[in-house]
Amino acid sequence: MSRIVYVNGEYLPEEDAKISVFDRGFLFADGVYEVTSVLGGKLIDFPGHTARLERSLSELDMAAPVDMDTLLDIHRELVQRNQVDDGLVYLQVTRGSDGDRDFVFPDAAKVASSLVAFTQSKPGVTESAASKSGIRVISIPDVRWGRRDIKTVQLLYPSMGKMMAKAAGVDDAWMVEDGEVTEGTSNNAYIVVGNRIITRQLGNEILAGITRAAVLRFAREAQMTVEERAFGIDEAKTADEAFVTSATTFVMPVVEIDGEVLGDGTPGPVAKRLREIYLDESRKAGI
């Protein structure tokens, strides 16, 4: 069965889905996106994703193509039509197309924003081998633009970072600016020192991860100590343990940074416990 995708008001087989060659997302990366996990056929952290989407649109002065209730209906319809039990829904909003290429934004009253969404089925995603063994990362310079707090589709450098990691024979990369870790290529980064969970404070330098917010809330509810502050790559290499969070990997232990093994080289107790809590609470709260 062909996957059904959503394109500007229509549910279509993926091979029939089309957007204009003049779409500003294609020409200028003038667009934002969200990825919502699906567990047991339910959407995880959906209100957080819509709130961040609205903020991203506002920061770029981009009109929302539909209201958030309609967006929920679209997500649910895609999950149902594609029979997704575990997986994700990818959503992308661009400034649309005014029929030509121009750096100047088109008039939003005349050119509608474009909305595309599709699903990816990932059976068994919560039981991935990587979550049991941990992942290895390298550090790379962070040379992205300054507004990383907006979830734009400008993902070329993070993609290059993934390829740098692959070339180095590891799983991912952490980006470093002025000696301090900003975030992973597609995730927020954490270290554990003693009984303290340390992750960079929110600002223009990093994305306000929806999974990040949930995990930190669960950590505090479990009486764990959380410090939101910058940490250096050298501090990370000597940490007791480390992990990353994202909508697609949940809580993922990190066991090696730049060839330096953390702890005994296996996922640490804090990361393992937070993963258990996050998955359990998210399944309960899914919609």
Image (cartoon, rainbow, N blue to C red):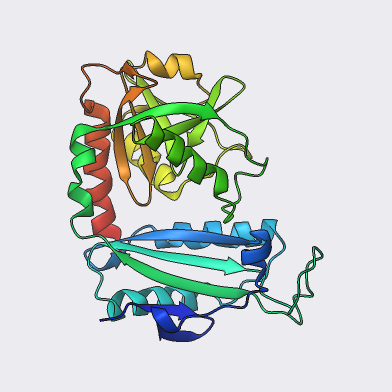
Please tell me how many numbered marks the rendered image carries: 0
* The C terminus sits in image quarter: bottom left
Q: Is residue 190 above or below residue 251?
A: above
Image quadrant where residue 39 sits: bottom left
Is residue 227 visible to the viewer in this orientation of the structure?
A: no
Q: Residue furthest front?
A: 167
Q: Is residue 86 above or below residue 138?
A: below
- For image coordinates 54% across by 81% down, the residue present is 8
- For image coordinates 57% across by 19% down, the residue present is 179
User: Which is more toward the observer, 257 or 44?
Assistant: 257
Residue 30 percent location from the top left of the image: 66, 61
Is residue 214 visible to the viewer in this orientation of the structure?
A: yes
User: Which is more toward the observer, 26 or 72?
Assistant: 26
Residue 172 percent location from the top left of the image: 39, 36
- For image coordinates 39% across by 16% down, the residue present is 237
Residue 96 placement, left or right of 44: right
- For image coordinates 56% across by 53% down, the residue present is 151
Residue 283 placement, left or right of 10: left
Residue 241 percent location from the top left of the image: 31, 22
